[in-house]
Amino acid sequence: MTTLTGTPNQALSPDRPDHPDQARRLRGLVEQRQHRSRVADDPAARATVIAVTSGKGGVGTSSLALNLAIALARLDVRVALLDASLGLGHLDLMCGLNGYWNLSHVLAGTRRLDDITLDGPAGIQVVPGAGRLCEIADTDKNPGPDVAGQLEDFESAHDVMVLDTGHAGHPSVNHCLGAADTVLVVTTPEPTALADAYATFKSMPSGTDTKLLTLINRVESAQAAGEIHQRLARTTRIFLESEPSLAGWIPEDPEVARAIHERTPLLVQAPQSPAARAISQLATRLIYHSPNTDNSPSFFQRLFPLTETSSKHHDNSD
């Protein structure tokens, strides 16, 4: 497990890019990421992958993933949202969409990835049924050359991919988490949620460069979030010899439940609500602190041994 630096009881800074140097750097990072991904025939073009997970259901993981994707898109980056939870996901329903096809049809060869991708709010692209990727990655099977090529083309067409994995703990999900650049482990102040968050950190694969972060949801204040994170960090430091940083905190907000009920994302329905503003600030921090991925394999290359199939795909496209 990666040991992270930083003050445990503080979120990654800056909270907002108010300082001119910080704002300039943020714009530069966005422009650099866009330029790199849009260069034609650039084999190094790949997306930054942010996985949103939790130790248990009911802590708001899917809502956070959806609204985080929208907030990132509003920073003028190209964003894909993959519903990678095992079983039946509901991200399409949460943003007022109804996808009939999903990634299982692509893997079966009956549909292409473009056919099942949905156009979501703020220009994000939503991929239903991406949990099948996690399941396959945990077996000896790999997608065929055609599907592998579609996946790589899809990744290179986006700057950021957000994965909603639901709750972790299953080996299939942990395989996906280990291939991501950043993993947000969502928890709430409830003791059972904190215990499950610790179990999530404990189950994460070792020996990866994945950055592990804690996100405290439905909490009353920054001070309370810091205290909760301190307790969690103290436990991981003692028993796991690592200490994930605090990505941020999201306040308790009745607008979140209202948005879910009305099948409209929070950042669309109530963009000035406290939770929406906190998620927008989280998106800015994640872009500002995003790892340099220029020379590292793509997400799908890490998830599957795609080197051979990838080269065949590009050779056939010449």
Image: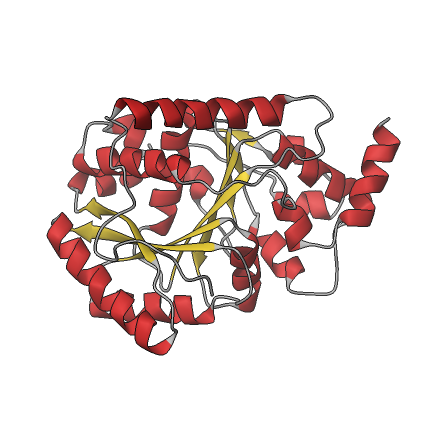
In the rendered structure, the answer to whether residue 253 lies left or right of residue 25 reads: left
The residue positioned farthest toward the bottom in the image shown: 239
Q: Residue at x 25, y 53 (%)?
A: 216
User: Would you say 161 lies left or right of 243 here?
Assistant: right
Residue at figure coordinates x 46%, y 38% from the top left: 92
- Give how far across and how far down residue 127 sits, in percent: 55, 39
69 lies above or below 302:
above
Q: Nearer the viewer, residue 119 or 32?
A: 32
Q: Is residue 189 visible?
A: no
Count of marks placed on residues = 0
The quarter of the rendered structure image containing the C terminus is: top right
Q: How is the image coloured?
A: secondary structure
Of the pair 112 and 16, the residue shown nearer to us: 16
Instruction: Say left or right for 66 vs 126.
Output: left
Asked if one can make out residue 175 in the rendered structure from this viewpoint, the answer is yes
Give above or below for 41 relative to 187. above
Instruction: Indicate the position of residue 150 as horizontal and vertical percent values.
Output: 71, 37
Residue at image coords 65%, 52%: 302
Q: Provide residue 135's location: percent of width, then percent of height.
A: 61, 60
Quarter-of-image position of residue 231: bottom left
> Up-down: is 6 above or below 1?
above
Name the spot of residue 196 as percent of width and height, x first: 33, 69
Picture quadrant where residue 271 is located: top left
Q: Of residues 208 and 53, which is closer to you in this image?
A: 208
| Quarter occupied by residue 255 | top left
Q: Residue visible at 66% across and 22% down?
A: 39
Instruction: Name the residue nearer the viewer: 246 or 99.
Output: 246
210 displayed left or right of 246: right
